[in-house]
Structure formats: C-alpha cells, structure tokens
Amino acid sequence: MVTAMPWPIPLEEELLETLQRFKAVDEAQTGTITYDQYKQVDQQSGTLCLTRIQLTNNRLFADYEKDPPQLDYTQMLLYFACHPDPLEGVYRALSVAVGTHIFRQVETPMLTAEKTSISTVSPNDDFPETEENVTREERELKEEKDERDQKEEEIPENANTEKISMETLLKVFGGGNEVLDANRFASYLKIENIYAENFIKTFQDLDAKNLEPIEINILLKHPYMQDLIANYSDYKLPDIKMIIQRSEHAQGSDGERSPSRLTEEKK
C-alpha cells in the first residue's frame, strides 16, 4: 500500500461510513464478508478514496483458509487509519474499531514510567538521519500540531462513553512477537500479542476483573494506555519519498567506496 502512494488519505468520516456499509451487508454480523458482498459495497461507495485504488480488493485482505474466502473488513479499514501523525493514526484506528468517533485526550502527559512492551521499529530506522531531513520532519510536525491546535475539537460531556472489549483492543494494537500464521491479515487469535498481558492488568486495575468491556474514556486515563498511545508507531504512515531518498543516498555512498571506483582513482 505504501509503495502505491501517493493516494489520498481517507477522512475518518469516510472510514466510518464505509464500515457501516460493510456492516449493512454483513447481515449475520460476523465481522467478515465475501468477495461478492465486498463488490456490492465497492460499487455503492464511489466517493470513498480507498475504493478508488485497486489495493483495497478482497484478494489482498481476504482469509483464504475459509471457503469462500472471507474479508475481515474492520481489519482492512484499520490499515487505512494510518496517518502521517502517529497519534492521529491511533485515534483513527480506535474510532474504526469502536465504530464511532473517539475524541482525543485533551492532554497526554509525558510519563516517566518504564515503557514496557512498547517496541516498534520505524520503517526509516535502516537509513541514517540527515540534519536536513530531521529539520524538515520537525517543521512539518510542528505545522500539523499548530493546525490541530487551531481547530481543537470541542469535547462533549458524554464523550468516549462507548465500551471497548479486550478482543477489540487487541485488534487495534496488533503487535505480535510471534506470528503463528504467515498471513499478516489473519485473525488476531493466531498471533501472540505482546500487549495482552499488560492489557489484562490494565482492565483489572480499572475494576474489570472478568475483563468485561470498559468505557473508552476510563481506559484512556490509565497511565499504561496513555504511554502506549503516545509511543505507538504502527499507525504512522511512512514517508516513502524520504525512504527512497535515504536509500539512494546510502547506495551513492557505497558506490563511492566501491573497488572499481578505488581502482580508477589509483590510475
């Protein structure tokens, strides 16, 4: 998907609208649909930008272990929740998972507690940072933050009272340290989630002793969740142009040190 960019980033409203369309054809509310059902939604939803690129077809996201193949449409939409701002991406993903807009916490404090189990690798880690790129990234992030602050959404009193289950939370934060199925789009149950143990403790801390669904607004106030959300990078949309530029720069540097180049210099 990233290599197919540039493509328009869908609005959260568009993701939620498409989610409702999928649910409408999923009469049994199983969370999955067939290819024919997918095509039905695809034909109806011509305004949604994610339906205008062929990457969103059933062949990429379907689970072929089932006959006929089934598409977990929520899982698919989670991939389109990615955003250049990783924090925005996480809240977009939470909104998709719950099925309604999740308001961002007014302030996410910087916690000094140890960041247990929060270990993600950025797609840019393989390439060295240059001062110019770092400066550009910082400037863009600051501009995005300033723009966000200017249009700060008014949070109603009953905001985020929807409940979220452990199953849904594991689907949003799908960090697996041992993938038991080669298909990355397989059910979360086939993946040993590195956050599961901490989520269980978090639910129990919030008096959900039997791990029953808990209100979003209560969950988001827990220090562990605040720390995780502030540092989670899986929903950050990579800057593919910068990755390519760094790759070309690295290859150019290697070329300067190549044996053939050194031989020519000696001549």
Image (cartoon, rainbow, N blue to C red):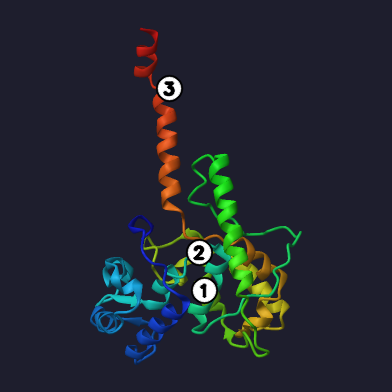
| Dot 1 amino acid type | Arg
Disc 3 element = loop
Count neighbours of disc 2 (C-alpha within 10 A) and say few if under 14, some if 14 to 19, many if 20 or more: many
The disc, 3 or 1, on the residue closer to the chain's N-terminal end is 1
Describe residue 91's horizontal placement relative to residue 114 as left or right: left
Asked whether disc 1 touches disc 2, contact meaning CB atoms under 8 Å apart, the reply is yes
The disc, 2 or 3, on the residue closer to the chain's N-terminal end is 2
Where residue 164 appears, x then y in whole percent? 57, 82
- Please identify the quarter of the rendering in which residue 186 is found: bottom left
Count neighbours of disc 1 (C-alpha within 10 A) and say few if under 14, some if 14 to 19, many if 20 or more: many
| Dot 2 amino acid type | Tyr
Q: Quadrant of the C terminus?
A: top left
Where residue 97 appears, x then y in whole percent? 49, 78
Q: Is residue 178 above or below residue 165?
A: above
| Dot 3 amino acid type | Arg
Q: How many marks?
A: 3
Q: Nearer the viewer, residue 190 or 169?
A: 169
**In the current view of this chain or complex, which residue is farthest to the top?**
267
Reading the image, the residue beneath label 3 is 257
Reading the image, the residue beneath label 1 is 92
Disc 2 element = loop
Reading the image, the residue beneath label 2 is 235
Count neighbours of disc 3 (C-alpha within 10 A) and say few if under 14, some if 14 to 19, many if 20 or more: few
The disc, 1 or 2, on the residue closer to the chain's N-terminal end is 1
Where residue 43 appears, x then y in whole percent? 25, 82
